[in-house]
Every structure is written in structure tokens, then in C-alpha cells.
């Protein structure tokens, strides 16, 4: 996905869980941030950092990469602020930037190491992590299951099931048709479920 | 009903992602098929587990690092400002280009469009789009520099349909027969152009730089925008 494919009209996209209240104050902060007010931009970073980090973490699977990606998201927001409509919700922009940045990170990572998703997944199951698996096994297994999805499926699942966006919103963020996104969500859910089943059975 | 074929629908059903008629169809099937009902229950559990991993604690100092990086980026000045260029030649060429552009507006547009079609196809560009500016307006800002931004309407089919786009100008290169190629950078400070884009189909191959253009009496001005895929040329007789 190319950066220049950023949607220019993304009205009405917001997470069910994190849908920010679009008060006048929020709009004012965004407007000032986009106009070059550094303090206002800082407020934007503080307000959205957690959401962006959460998304990049689930898209990339590693916290160290996720932190770098989250930082890059805000730097790109700064770079492309002229393209953003301050009257509209910022969240869809951030999700889209996060997806784009993570796509670039994954591509770079693949260039450096040719580890496949399956290998990456298997490599995470080692004795050192056994304790962590036992502590919070369900979360770990699901996080590993996400690694087995294709990039598109993973983005769709993260935005729909973890971030709680509607299918329509996910389609707009990913620049796809709704029917395509539904198909990716469906395949993604079944694959996650089957991975969890297999992994759980293997361990029992 | 074929349970195997329903698997995909059930995966959507558990998230409420199906249109109502299909939702009802799947619901009816689940009432009568214990195997699929179990499959649906397991998918619901998977979906709950996915929701459950959504709560992430930020590592210590993570937010502060991002804030510092953003603050640093905001205070960083453009790599080379127009004023920092010790090139009187660049200023002269720029002023000449502007004067020519303003004075030969109509002709400039026609020439640019013709040139973009003939030369660009011939030269096999690897940029996605080349833009022939038409119509154009530009103005001189303070200190003789041009200031402003550049907007273009894309006629290329995109997944969002035709759309208006705005680019910031990152750099400018001027190719003039009597001078070596000069270039300058300075963000929005030096260039104001408002134009409509004519998209030339991608032709593949390498971008041929200004130096590759046979020298003639024309002045070639190359705008490098903040979008690496968009390069804009002005050709001035």
C-alpha cells in the first residue's frame, strides 16, 4: 500500500470502543495541530499514542518494532498534515497510517530475514517463553495465531475484532471493497480458531 | 445444507457481519446442526480472545520517546533553505523561469502538455504520474522567492475516484541552456503553483533526468514534491 494512496475522504470512521467525542475542543486542538501549533500536536500524540501503539503491536507482533512504527506514524502524520481535514475524525487517518507503516516495516523485515510466518510463529514457542505462555496462555496463543495470517487478513482482523471498527470502516481504511474485507475477516477468524485448536490440542 | 460451505458464513455470523437475510439463514441452520453450533461457539470464543488481547500496556518511556521525536522533527528546518543556497545563478535562473512562465503562460501550457506526452513516453519514466500543469497560477512571495503550495486534481482512476490532491514542493531543479543545472530546496517557501493534473500513463523504465534532455532553448523546471511518485515539469521556451 503506497503512502500516496491515503484516502482523502474518510468521514465517519471511528472505533466503536475508542470513538472519540468530537467536541468543539477536540476539533479545535486538531485544527491548531494541523496548522502548525506544536503544543496542540503534542496533545494529539498524547491522546492517540496508546491506540496507535496497540494497532502497530498487533500488526507487527513485536513491541520493539511496534514502538518504532508508532513513532513513524506520528512523524508521517506531521509530514502529511496538510492532507488532513481537521473537521473530521483523526482516528481513521491514524489507523491507515499505522497499516501503511507496518506494511513497510514488515517488508523491510522480510528483506532482512526471510523468516516465514510459520517459522516466526514456531520460533516464538521456545522454552524461554514457556513461563509467559503459562501465565497468559490464551493471549499468547491468539497473538501467535495472528502471525499465521496474511498481511491483509491480519490488518482486517486487528481493525475489526481488536479495534472494534465496523466492516465498512475497515474497508475504507484498507482501501478495499466491503465484500473483500468480509472475506478476509472470515478467513482470518477461521484460521485463528484452527491455530488455537491445534496449538491447544498439541499442548494437552 | 453443506456445513463445509457454511464455515465462512458462520465466521461472519459470529461477528454480526452478515446482512440480515443471511444472518437468519445461518441462525436457522445452527438451530438444527449441533456440529455447526459448536463451531460457532468456538469462533465466538476466538473472537472474545482476540478482543482480550486489545489491552496493551505501553512500555515505560514509550510515549515520551515519540513526543521527543515529533518535537525534534518540528524544530528541524528544511535541509536547505532557498536563502542558504549561495547560488546567484540559481536565483537568476529561477527569476528567469518565473518571468518566462508568467509571460508565456498560454504557450507554456501547450508546450508542457505536448512535451509531457511526446518526451515522457519516449523517455520511459518509472514514476506513476507526470503532471502537465494546466491551468497554472503562481506568484512571487517575499524576497523574490515563490511561496505557497501546489494542488492537483488527479484524473487517474483511483479506488476513491477522481480526487483533488495537494502536494508540498520539496525541491526545484532548473535546467537552462546557458547555465549548469541548478536546484534548490526549501519546502513551501519557494513555490506556489495551482494546477490541474493531466496524467500520463506509466511507461516503466528509468527516469531520465533533466541532464538527459537534449539542450535547446527551453528552460526545464522540475518540481519535486513531497510525494515521491509525483514529479512536475515546466517547460518554458
Image (cartoon, helix red, strand yellow):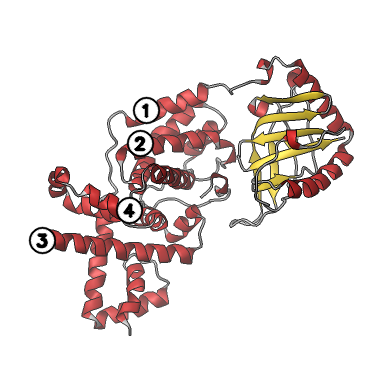
Separation of disc 1 and disc 3 at Cα? 42 Å
Chain letter of disc 4 in the image:
A
* Residue name at image x 62 percent, y 43 percent: B229
Mark 4 secondary-structure assignment? helix
Find out whether the residues at labels 1 and 2 contact each other: C-beta distance under 8 Å: yes
In this rendering, the label closer to the viewer, 4 or 2: 4
Residue A172 higher or lower than B61, as above or below: below
Residue A123 higher or lower than A179, as above or below: above
Q: Which of marks 3 and 2 is nearer the N terminus?
A: 2
Mark 2 secondary-structure assignment? helix
Percent x, y for residue B78? 59, 23
Percent x, y for residue A82? 59, 37
Residue B129 higher or lower than A38, as above or below: below
Separation of disc 4 and disc 2 at Cα? 20 Å
Q: Which residue lies furthest to the bottom in this view?
A: B1
In this rendering, the label closer to the viewer, 3 or 2: 3
> What residue is disc 1 on?
B65
Q: Earlier in the sequence, mark 3 or mark 4?
A: 4
Asked if residue B179 lies left or right of residue A27, the reply is right
> What residue is disc 3 on?
A204
Mark 1 secondary-structure assignment? helix
Q: Residue A67: which numbered mark, if any?
A: 2
Q: Do labels 4 and 2 share a chain?
A: yes
Instruction: Give the quarter of the image for residue B66.
Output: top left
Percent x, y for residue A166? 42, 58
Foreground pick, B211 / B92: B211
> What residue is disc 4 on?
A117
Chain letter of disc 1 in the image:
B
Separation of disc 1 and disc 4 at Cα? 29 Å
Foreground pick, B212 / A17: B212
* Residue name at image x 26 percent, y 50 percent: B53
Asked if residue B177 lies left or right of residue A135, the reply is right
Amino acid at each position: 500500500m503506497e503512502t500516496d494512496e491515503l484516502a482523502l475522504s474518510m468521514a465517519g470512521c471511528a472505533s466503536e470502543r475508542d470513538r472519540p467525542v468530537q467536541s468543539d475542543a477536540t476539533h479545535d486542538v486538531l485544527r491548531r495541530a494541523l496548522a502548525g501549533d506544536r503544543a496542540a500536536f503534542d496533545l494529539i500524540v498524547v491522546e492517540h499514542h496508546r491506540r496507535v501503539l496497540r494497532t502497530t503491536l498487533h500488526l507487527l507482533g513485536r513491541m520493539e518494532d511496534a514502538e518504532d512504527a508508532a513513532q513513524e506514524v506520528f512523524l508521517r502524520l506531521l509530514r502529511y498534515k496538510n492532507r488532513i481535514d481537521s473537521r473530521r475524525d483523526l482516528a481513521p487517518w491514524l489507523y491507515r497510517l499505522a497499516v501503511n507503516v507496518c506494511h513497510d516495516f514488515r517488508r523491510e523485515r522480510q528483506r532482512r530475514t526471510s523468516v516465514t510466518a510459520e517459522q516466526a510463529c514456531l520460533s516464538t514457542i521456545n522454552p524461554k517463553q514457556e513461563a509467559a505462555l503459562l501465565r497468559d496462555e490464551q493471549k499468547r496463543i491468539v497473538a501467535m495465531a495472528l502471525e499465521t495470517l496474511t498481511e491483509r487478513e491480519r490488518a482486517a482482523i486487528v481493525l475489526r475484532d481488536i479495534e472494534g471498527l465496523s466492516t465498512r470502516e475497515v474497508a475504507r481504511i484498507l482501501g478495499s471493497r466491503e465484500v473483500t474485507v468480509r472475506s478476509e475477516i472470515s478467513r482470518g477468524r477461521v484460521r485463528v480458531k484452527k491455530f488455537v485448536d491445534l496449538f491447544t490440542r498439541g499442548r494437552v | 445444507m453443506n456445513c463445509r460451505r457454511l464455515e465462512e458464513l458462520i465466521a461472519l455470523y459470529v461477528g454480526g457481519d452478515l446482512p440480515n437475510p443471511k444472518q437468519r439463514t445461518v441462525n436457522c441452520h445452527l438451530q438444527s446442526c449441533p456440529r455447526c453450533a459448536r463451531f460457532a461457539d468456538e469462533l465466538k470464543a476466538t473472537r472474545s480472545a482476540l478482543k482480550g488481547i486489545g489491552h496493551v500496556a505501553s512500555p515505560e518511556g514509550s510515549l515520551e520517546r515519540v513526543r521527543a521525536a515529533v518535537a525534534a522533527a518540528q524544530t528541524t528546518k528544511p535541509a536547505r533553505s532557498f536563502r542558504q543556497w549561495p547560488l546567484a545563478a540559481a536565483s537568476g535562473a529561477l527569476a528567469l523561469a518565473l518571468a518566462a512562465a508568467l509571460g508565456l503562460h498560454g504557450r507554456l501550457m501547450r508546450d508542457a502538455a505536448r512535451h509531457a506526452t511526446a518526451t515522457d513516453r519516449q523517455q520511459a519514466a518509472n514514476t506513476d504520474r507526470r503532471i502537465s500543469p494546466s491551468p497554472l497560477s503562481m506568484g512571487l512571495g517575499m524576497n523574490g522567492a515563490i511561496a505557497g503550495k501546489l494542488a492537483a486534481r488527479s484524473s487517474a482512476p483511483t479506488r476513491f475516484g477522481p480526487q483533488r490532491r495537494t502536494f508540498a514542493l520539496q525541491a526545484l531543479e532548473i535546467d537552462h541552456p546557458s547555465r549548469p543545472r541548478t536546484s534548490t530546496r526549501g519546502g513551501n517557501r519557494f513555490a506556489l503553483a495551482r494546477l490541474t493534473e493531466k496524467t500520463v500513463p506509466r511507461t516503466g523504465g528509468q527516469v531520465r533526468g533533466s541532464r538527459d534532455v537534449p539542450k535547446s532553448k527551453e528552460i526545464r523546471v522540475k518540481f519535486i514534491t513531497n510525494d515521491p511518485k509525483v514529479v512536475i515539469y515546466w517547460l518554458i521556451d
